[in-house]
Amino acid sequence: MTSDTPRTPAPEPPDNTAGEPDVDSKAHANRWRSLIVLALALSLVVIDGTIVAVAIPDIVQDLGMDLSDAQWVSASYAVVLAAFLLTAGSLGDRLGRRRILTVGVILFLIGSLIAASADSAGSLIVGRLVQGLGATAILPGTLSTVNATFRGKDRAAAFGIWGAVISGAAALGPLAGGWLTTSFTWPWIFLVNLPVAAIVLIGVFLWVPETKISTLKPGFDIAGLVTSALGFGLIVFALIEGQTFGWWNATADLDIGPWTWPQTAPISIVPVALVVGFLLLALFVANEKRQARRSRLALLDLTLFRLPTFRWGNLTAMTVAVGEFGIIFVLPLFLVNVLALSTMGAGYVLAAMALGAFVSGASARHVAAKFGAPQVVVLGLSLEVIGVLLVAWIATAGVSPWALGAVLVVYGAGLGFASAQLTGTTLSQVPPEQSGEGSAAQSTARQVGSALGTAVVGAALAAALATTVPQSLEPLALPDPEVQQLTDATADSAGSIISQGRDLGTDSPLGEATPDVVESLEDGFADATRASLLVAAVFLSIGLGGSLMVRRAARQNPELA
């Protein structure tokens, strides 16, 4: 199909609505008000996935966290989302999506209060876990309600808005985090959720219709819940804690209540957790197949993956999220610790992504009308790959924040194009009666990717620091023990030791050598940042390959092209 061949503008096939259940007249009349409420609920969840990133340097210093703690603050939210989204989607289909959405907003409020009042890394992570649990009930309900409420061209527009909110909110999060942290204190990045959630609850009560599946298979998939939650959790734990407990040989004791995995063990807990995690996910797949054969309820209908756009779209969503959230985790640390920007300054630089995302997200539907939604996804991911490679190229200790922001506009434009059309394209072949399962699976793919992104790219940063910091300190001819101490301190503090040394000047324990050491640490951290960004670029490139397969599948089905 050539580029000038007319294509339908919608990522959803317009002709499949004939067999769908009718939409209630009141729900139809309120559908756009409902969409506004659902978009606000969605933005609450998405912004909270990224708003923390720019505040991490301040939180690290205030609560005395290390790099592993910082990763968990970001990843714990995504881990819970990845673990329970399928369950929440299934519960929404069974009990009512508006009911589960309401419970989710209330849980999100509770988690925000816990996080805002945290006085330690542990209590903050608990708050993030509760927030994540609330988000699991919010996210699939928004998408499946849109899918169940809108029809035809209205559905295409609604999906475009839904995708644009994802890209714009994700990019806007760091700016909001920078402003709240600078103008007030970091707990306000959580307290701001309270009035927004209250508005969402009122809107849900007034305008969002209750939708659910009238005929459901019997039973509840407890085995699927347990194996998927533990599987995803163990894999993310291993990736984050590899530096702490050793990738193969045990380097520290792991205490879990009264139980200890000792440093003297013949092997680290990390490879064991990885193997067990993958085995549990294999058991999850086997269980889902067994549930289907027995005609019992399964968390995930694996037959959906026979649909080419669903299969390749989910692969694309997951791998792209690895790159995107890895970048969001690493860049604020670089901007604050290496470029010596304030939290607000870092937010302004990262807001360049929001600028690009809003512009491209708003125009994505019109571009899709001419070239087709799958082609817009390919365009967006191509821009993302180019953007992150440019960032990795120029991200030195002496780079201008303006130059970095300009490059991030390109990256953000790609983010907007890809996110605005990927969701609808992925779900384009999914039957409406399976919209809960399909949307939950698609959201799960994103959240697995985001959790892995923080873990994988954070691990790459930590591994790179072990090499780049000693190399940058070589010209100073410091004693080996001191070099090792500085290297460990840089990794353990997530780079905040650089800012501390800069603030102390010659009053630091290093005395007159402090400015030179700080400059060397800046160079080392910048080099490690560039290495970790290249890892993110690899995952974005894999996602680009997946989007090409989505485009190929769509071209074989002219209704979706």
Image (cartoon, rainbow, N blue to C red):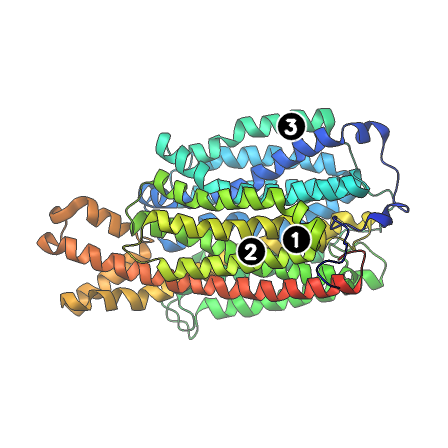
- Residue that protrudes farthest toward the right in the picture: 19
Kind of residue indicated by mark 2: Ala
Q: Quadrant of residue 540?
A: bottom right
Mark 2–mark 3 distance (CA, rounded to whole Å): 29 Å
Q: Which residue is mark 1?
A: 422
Kind of residue indicated by mark 1: Leu
Does 524 appear above or below 150?
A: below
- Mark 3 Cα shell of 10 Å, populated few (<14), some (14-19), many (≥20): some
Q: Which residue is mark 2?
A: 321
Q: Position of residue 63 (x, y in %)?
A: 34, 42
Q: Which residue is mark 3?
A: 201
Kind of element beneath mark 1: helix
For the N terminus, which image quadrant?
bottom right
- Residue that protrudes farthest toward the bottom in the picture: 266
For residue 373, the mark is none
Please say if the residues under marks 1 and 3 sit with CB atoms less than 8 Å apart. Answer: no
